[in-house]
Amino acid sequence: MATIVIDLRDRRPIWELPGRARDAITASLPPGWTVRFMETLSDGSGDGAGHVTGELLEAVADARVYMGYGIPAEVLEHGRRLEWVHSGAAGVAGSLHAAMLASDVLFTNSAGVHAAPMAETVMAMILHFARGLDVAVRARQEGRWAAPEYWAADAPVTEVGASTVGIVGFGGIGREVARRAAAMGARVLAVRRGGDDMLTCIIDDEKYNLEYEVGAGRNVLDHTIGQSDYLVLALPETAQTRGLMTAERLFAMKPGAVLINVARGRLVDEQALLEALDSGRLRGAGLDVFHTEPLPADHPFYRHPRVLMTPHVSATTHRFWDRQTELITDNIGRFARGERLRNLVDRTAGY
């Protein structure tokens, strides 16, 4: 017999655990198992709760499983019988505190659940710049007909099928971006970690097979940066990736390239990015994540003509709960049968 405590309430309605998910989770329980859904709104910050309720601490005291948006240290400290904890978020940086690092409890996250909508956001950003929609938007705001800008010899328009899309981070999100970009005819380079090295692979346009280029280490990453018309960041924030896009790397990007970041804001030197945009080195930047969120109202990104911004919503979709519920119910069955869980987090790697 086991008790599961589920704390997936959220201040944002679209992330709030719906009734259909509660019903599906309850129906999936093995005989003798019980589930307790928390009713008090705790935090809903995504990577780790900043406020833990008394109701929650009382509930986890006898539970074997906990599920929430992030894993607060207090949950592990009070949940002495916990064997498995699951975060409904993909990012785990806020949950890798001392209590988690010292614990041997199984830890899973929701990596991959957000892949499809995030990949579609990436493609929308690519198309925004490829087809010069930024010019049209700006002209509409200024009340002018912009056709002459599209007829110019240096018109800011191209085709995705004539471009190279570089993807840094080849997990669920990166693979979904690769499929979509390749389907539009783009040459796709993907960079992933291979042991202690970075590896580059080329996506076959028809079968999406991976053909690894020769080379390893940071030079491969830099090679991809210099080759890409659109450079997509889709990797987790860790001690190794924080600050990955330095001023040197931003200015090493292909002239006229576009940087797209749907991963974490701290992967990029934002001041250096502004300088690369102001200088004209980069065609633009599509940004869903930032160092500080919400972004301060006086930040230059808001008014920059070369920046397309979304407020950390690339994962937002009404289909989220279909995928999240499938992951949760499948892992409950695996846990009950003693099988390996999906989406186990590597505490050392940070994802």
Image: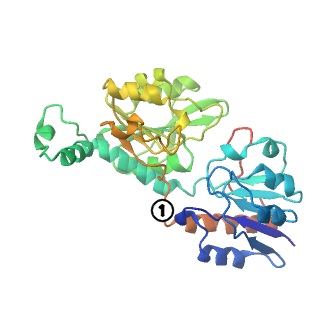
Its colouring scheme is rainbow
Q: Position of residue 253 (x, y in %)?
A: 40, 26
Q: Position of residue 183 (x, y in %)?
A: 37, 51
Residue 232, located in which quarter of the rendered image?
A: top left
Residue 281 makes an appearance in the image: no
Q: Position of residue 89 (x, y in %)?
A: 62, 54
- Amino acid under disc 1: Thr
Question: Does 335 appear above or below 346?
Answer: below
Quadrant in the picture for the N terminus = bottom right
Residue at the far top in the pictured view? 248
**Does residue 101 appear to the left or right of 125 in the view shown?**
right
Residue 82, located in which quarter of the rendered image?
A: bottom right
As helix, strand or loop, the secondary structure at mark 1 comes to loop
Question: Does 61 appear above or below 37?
Answer: above
Task: Answer few, some or many: residues within 10 Å of disc 1's Cα (few below 14, many 20 plus, some between 14 and 19).
Answer: some
**Does residue 295 appear to the left or right of 73 in the view shown?**
left
Name the residue carrying label 1: 317
Question: Does 166 appear above or below 31?
Answer: above
Depth check, front residue: 195 or 272: 272
Give the residue drawn at x 76%, y 57%. 85
Q: Position of residue 314 (x, y in %)?
A: 47, 52
